[in-house]
Amino acid sequence: MKSTWNLIGMVLWLLVLITLIWMTHDMRVRRLHLIVKEGRSFSWRNLTISTIELVVWLAFFGGMSYTTFFQNVNQLGNRITQTTRYDPLVLNTGASNGSSYYVEVENGEGQKPIQQYTYLTEGERYKVDSTAATVSSGKDPINLPASAYHWNRQQVKKYDSRHQKAWVGVIETTYKKNFVNGIGLHAGRLANRFTLIRIPDHSFMVQK
């Protein structure tokens, strides 16, 4: 568990389950009471009570489902924190044609194929999907996909100069550890990760 605040969400989901069990039991008891005491299985009063119980439970369940599964990270504002790290790329000399490269590209299959980018930093090897990464080789390091995120332009310019346009920047957004995020079981958890792979030009990419 990333944070004890998530215990709040666990308790609330437990209440959702308990409320469902209680509501089902209450509806059955009231119906049996009608049959035994009044000799009928339907009454408007009983239907009204059951409808109110169901509407309240659905609102509770819907609110918890939205908070837990369907929140838009881009609309959370001050409920998340962003960290950015930069690392220089390491030149890979293992291409079959004898050339060197920074990024190896592997094309996926299917109706909506996803590319995978493999790159090296000092002592580490990474593979990321094109759904959460981009390769930039233009004049401006922050290409169109990367521009959706908040980058420190001065830091980017410094790394472009220091590492000859061969570096990687990783932005991570994390849910803050607080009461509201705990309701959705998100407190302290990673919300999103995006990778910007900067290379001098496309000749430093190879296709697998």
Image (spheres, rainbow, N blue to C red):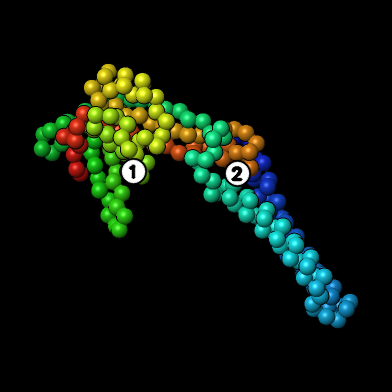
Q: Position of residue 69 (x, y in %)?
A: 54, 49
**Mark 2 nearby-residue class (10 Å; few <14, some 14–19, many ≥20):** many
Q: Position of residue 82 (x, y in %)?
A: 48, 30
**Mark 1 nearby-residue class (10 Å; few <14, some 14–19, many ≥20):** some
Looking at the figure, which quarter contains the N terminus? top right
Above or below, 192 against 163 in this view is below
Query: Residue placed at 54% from the left, 35% from the top?
Result: 77
Secondary element type, mark 2? loop
For the question of whether residue 96 can be seen, the reply is: yes
Q: Quadrant of residue 89?
A: top left
Which mark is on residue 184?
2
Q: Amino acid at mark 1?
A: Asp
Q: Residue furthest left?
A: 97
In front here: 103 or 146? 146
Looking at the image, residue 48 sits to the left or right of residue 105; the answer is: right
Above or below, 43 against 171 in this view is below
Looking at the image, residue 73 sits to the left or right of residue 140; the answer is: right
For the question of whether residue 2 can be seen, the reply is: no
Q: Position of residue 50 (x, y in %)?
A: 76, 66
* Residue corresponding to mark 1: 129
Q: Quadrant of residue 202?
A: top left
Q: Position of residue 199 (x, y in %)?
A: 24, 30
Looking at the image, residue 89 sits to the left or right of residue 151; the answer is: left
Query: Residue placed at 12% from the left, 33% from the top?
Result: 99
Secondary element type, mark 1? strand
Q: CA distance from mark 1 to mark 2?
A: 27 Å
Q: Amino acid at mark 2?
A: Gly
Sooner in the amino-acid sequence: mark 1 or mark 2 = 1
Check contact, mark 1 vs mark 2: CB within 8 A.
no
